[in-house]
Amino acid sequence: MPPPLSSRLSPTLLYIAMDDLRSIFWTLAVSFTAYILMRRRFDPLRSIPTVGGPSVPGIFYPNLAAFNFVRNAKELLTIGHEKYRGAAFKVAFMGRWIVVVSDSKHLDEIKSHPELSIAEGLDEFLQLKHTIGATAQSDRFHVNAIRDQLTRSLNVVMPAVAEELALAIPEYIPCTGDGPWISGARRSIQQTVGILKPIFDERKTKLQEYGADWTDRPSLTHALYDLATHPGFIQPLRDEIESVIAADGWTKRGMNNLWKLDSFLRESQRVNGLFLISLARKAMKDVTLHDGTFLSKGTFIVADKCTVHNDDNNYEQADQFDPFLFARMREVPGEDLKHQLATTSREYLPFGHGKHACPGRFFASMELKAVMSYLLVNYDIALDGSLRPENQYFGIDISPDPSGRVLFRRREPRGP
C-alpha cells in the first residue's frame, strides 16, 4: 500500500500548497466583492429603494429574492406602499428588478409614455411567445378584430350568447331529483363508478385547468363567491334583472341597463381581480419620470393595482365590499358612463388604462353580466359554508380558491 500523500510531501511543500489555496480564496473573494461594488456603483436603479431584501445588483440575488416575491408578493407590495407612500420602489423578479408605482401622476405617465412598451411588458409577464406564439406580439390582428369588429357587433352577438347560456348552463348545473330506487345490479355499477370517478374527475379538472383557459372564469368564480357570501343582495339583483329582461330582452341594451349587477361585478373586480399589478411596461429607451425616477433601457415598471384599489383616497371604506357602490356613483349627473364595469380609470385598473386598455373588456363585461343574470333568474344560490373561500396568491396572480363550493337549486325556469 502506498504511503499517504502527506508522508510523501515535505512540510515546506504542504505549506506552499496551503498558502496557494489561501491566496486563491482571497483573490476570488476580493474579485467578487469588487465586482459587486462596481455593479452597485454603476447600477442604473441604485437610487430606487428595494423591498424584499438588499439592493444587490447582478443576476444571482434577484433570482434568489424572486422566490420570496413569488411566495409573498401581496405582503411585499403592501410593505412598499406603506413605507414609500406612492414613491417608486423595486422588487426582485426572475433575473431582474421590477419598479413599482401607485400614485396617480405615475399612472398617468406610464399608461401613455411612448417609450414604455405594453407589448414588451405583457410578453415578459405572460410569456406570450411561449404560451401563444411569437406572432401574437408582432402581428396585432387579434386586437383590431376585437376592437373594430367584435365590440361594434355586441348587439348582434348578445342573442347568440343568451341562446348558448340556456343550453350550456343546465349541462353544468343539472336539475336532479331523488331518482328511482336502485336495484342490486345498479348498486354494483354505482360502486364501480365510485371507484373510477375520482380518476375521471382528476383528468377532467386537468383538462379544464390546462386547456383553453378563459379569463372570465376566475372573474365569474370571484363574483359567485361574493354573491353567495352576501345573500342579502341576491333579491335586489334578481328584481333588477327580471325587470330589465322583461323590458329589453337579452340584448346589449338590456345588459347595459343592469346598473346594480354591473356595479356588483365591478366591485368584485376591485376587491379581487386576476393580478396584483397592472400597466406592465418595458422601457425601450432610457426614461426619466416626472419625479426624477430614472428607468434605464430594458427596465420593467408596473402599477400596484391592489394598493390603488384599496386606497381610501380613491374609495370610501376601501377595505369593505360595497356591491352597489358604483351604481350610486353613476346616479350623480354626468357620472353615469364613468363607473361601468368596462370603464377604466386611474382608480380602477383590472383592464389596464388608457389607449392600451384591454380591447376585449366590453365583450367580457357583457358576457359576465349575461351569465350572472341567467344564474340569478334560474337558480337559488348559496355558499357551502359560512366564510368566503380565501383568494390564493402566487407571485402576481390572484386566483379564487378552487376547492370552494357554491350550491345551486333550480327555480321556476325563466330562461331566455
Image (spheres, rainbow, N blue to C red):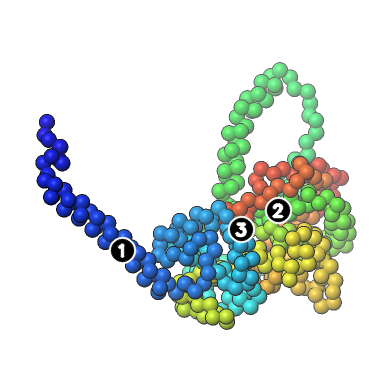
Which quadrant is home to the N terminus? top left
Above or below residue 209? Residue 64 is below
Residue type for callout 2 = His
State which mark lies toward you, 1 or 3: 1
- SS class of the residue under badge 2? helix
**Residue 381: percent from left, percent from top:** 80, 46
Q: Nearer the viewer, residue 145 or 35?
A: 35
Image coords of residue 280 (percent x, y)? 56, 68
Give the SS element for disc 3.
Answer: helix
For disc 2, the marked residue is 222
User: Which residue shows up at 59% across the image and 38% down it?
Assistant: 202
Disc with the residue nearer the chain's start (1 vs 3): 1
Determine which quarter of the picture holds residue 6. top left
Task: State the mark number for residue 74.
Answer: 3
Q: Residue at x 60, y 41 (%)?
A: 204
Residue 11 appears in view = yes
Q: Secondary structure at mark 1?
A: helix
Question: What is the number of the mark on residue 70?
Answer: none
Q: Which residue is farthest top? A: 184
Is the C-beta separation of discs 1 and 3 under 8 Å? no
Q: Mark 1 — residue?
A: 30
Residue 247 position by quadrant = bottom right
Which residue in the rendered view is the most extreme toward the front?
A: 11
Q: Nearer the viewer, residue 149 or 262?
A: 262
